Every structure is written in structure tokens, then in C-alpha cells.
Amino acid sequence: MPSTRRPTYKTGAPAGRGKAEPASGRSDVISASRPAPAADVASAPQRATDNVLSFPEPKGRRIRRNIILAVCIVAALMAGLLAAAVYSPVFAVQTVSVDGTKMLTPQQVQDALKPLHGKPLPQVHDDEVKQLLQPLVQVKDVTTEARPPSVLVVHIQERTPVALVKQGDVFQLVDVDGVQLGTTQEPGSILLPVIDGGAGVIGKELFKAITAVLAALPADVLARLSDASAKSVDAVELKLVDGQTIVWGNAGEKELKAKVLEALLKAPANPKNPVQVYDVSVPRHPVTR
């Protein structure tokens, strides 16, 4: 069987020989070697990874990483500032400014809100302020405004008195809900009508019908009333200080009735035929007689 070895040619002196022959008379030596078996090649150590090429990081990925890092830093700083604002005594309440009071005095509101002094402004909420002002029945609603570093502004919305209710020797001021807002012994000094029936009518159906009507009237018309009464919820009547009677009827269409009555009261009076009754129970067809 023919040999599969491939001859190789080496130039120079063979190993183990003496000096090489002169160049002019050198002889070429032919030698053959067997190729290494495949198993030997597989078992050879892997080439070192020193020659592995490294590619630079894509620019887009580097920018995204920097943006995320910057956002995290800013968020951490904001969280620190927020915590400092919420808990720092630098922003503690030192002054309470009050507006919107008529029946109450600003000092009454400030006294009720003394527990808020020293509390950081961001921790003060409207619900807490309302709770502290609950004993002041004149307060209907309240909103607050923080003015750093230490001022809390309190906007008061008071209940509106619409009538007086006689109880013994005094008269109680009441709003449309029947909340008693104060007392007076001189009803003439307050331009509000007196509701007939005494304090026992407060909260009853007739009382609610009357106060609903009074709440719909403009302030200038309300100031001209002397008293208000109702035989039923559908038969509310008002009296003017000049003696005229206003037949109102029920509480339906009270806004339209109020506008019609205001227009009738502004009409020029006729001395020869003075009006004694203003009937607005059917507001689209009012009657005077």
C-alpha cells in the first residue's frame, strides 16, 4: 500500500552533524515527518485570550446610562429636600392670618388654632383646621394657604343668618339649616325677619320651608322684612316693615320668585293706589293688590 507521508525539505546541516558545508557545496537533506494525529490536536491547550478584540460601548447605551444615573441623583436630592421641608422646624407655623370673618373676630379663630403653632406647614391640612374650628358654629367652611416660611393663612366662610327666632327675652340668629349663630335682645338692630312660632319651630318642616325662602332673597329685600310665617309648607307668607304682605306659596321656583319680587318692589309706588299685597306664588303671573 503506498505511503501517505508527505516529504518535507529542509535546507542546512542535519541535526547532530558538525559544521555546515560551505554555501557553494551545500547539500540539501530530505526528511519526512508524520502529521500529528487529530486526537493530539484536540488535546492541545487553547490559545490564550490575549488576542480577543474588545469593542467600545455603543454611544446610545452610554447616554441612556448617564441619563438614568442623573435622574436617580435628582430624585434622591428632591426626596431629601421634601423630607427637610416636611419635618424641618424652619417651616413651622408661627403666624396665623385670618380673613372672611364677620360674626367672629380673627382673634377667636387664632385662639382656636393655637395647637398648630410650631407644626411644620406641610403637615397642616384643612381637615385638621376644620376639626379645631368645630366649636365655632359660625364657621361653615374653611380653606388654608401656606406662605413659607412660617405663615398659615386661613380663609373662613361663615354661615349666613337669615332670620331671628324669639326664645324668652332674647332672639336667636339662625341660618337656613337652623344653626344658632348668636343672640340679641334688640331685634330692631338686626335687619332680619322674625320667624313666628318660637324656638320650638327650629328644624321642623315649616321652619325649613321658611328659611329656604329667606335664603333665596337678595340682601336688600331680606333687610326690608319684618317677619315670616307659614300655615303649611305651601303657604309661606312674608311681612315687610312697611306693612305689605308677600304671598310666596311653596319653596318651588324660589330663585325666579325672588327676582320677580325684587322687580315689583323697585317699581314706582302709586300714592292713589298703594300696594298692600305682592303675590308671587305663580311667578310668571305675579299679582299686586
Image (tube, rainbow, N blue to C red):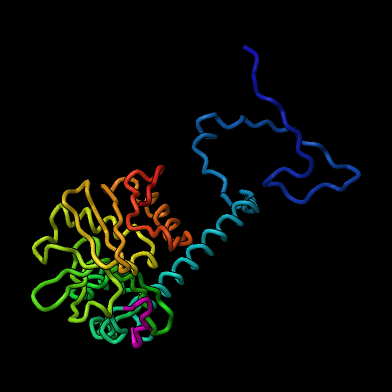
- Residue range highlighted in magenta: 91-102
Query: In the rendered image of this protein, does residue 131 appear above or below residue 231?
Result: below
Residue found at the very far front of the displayed protein: 272
Q: Magenta includes 98?
A: yes
Q: Position of residue 14 (x, y in %)?
A: 72, 43
Q: Indicate left or right for 277 with 209 as reference.
A: right
Q: Position of residue 97 (x, y in %)?
A: 37, 83
Q: Indicate left or right for 20 with 266 as reference.
A: right
Q: Indicate left or right for 247 with 170 as reference.
A: right
How many numbered discs? 0
Residue found at the very far top of the displayed protein: 1
Q: Position of residue 193 (x, y in %)?
A: 25, 67
Q: Magenta includes 42?
A: no
| Front residue (pair 92, 97) | 97
Q: Residue at x 29, y 60 (%)?
A: 214
Image quadrant assignment for residue 213: bottom left
Q: Residue at x 88, y 42 (%)?
A: 25
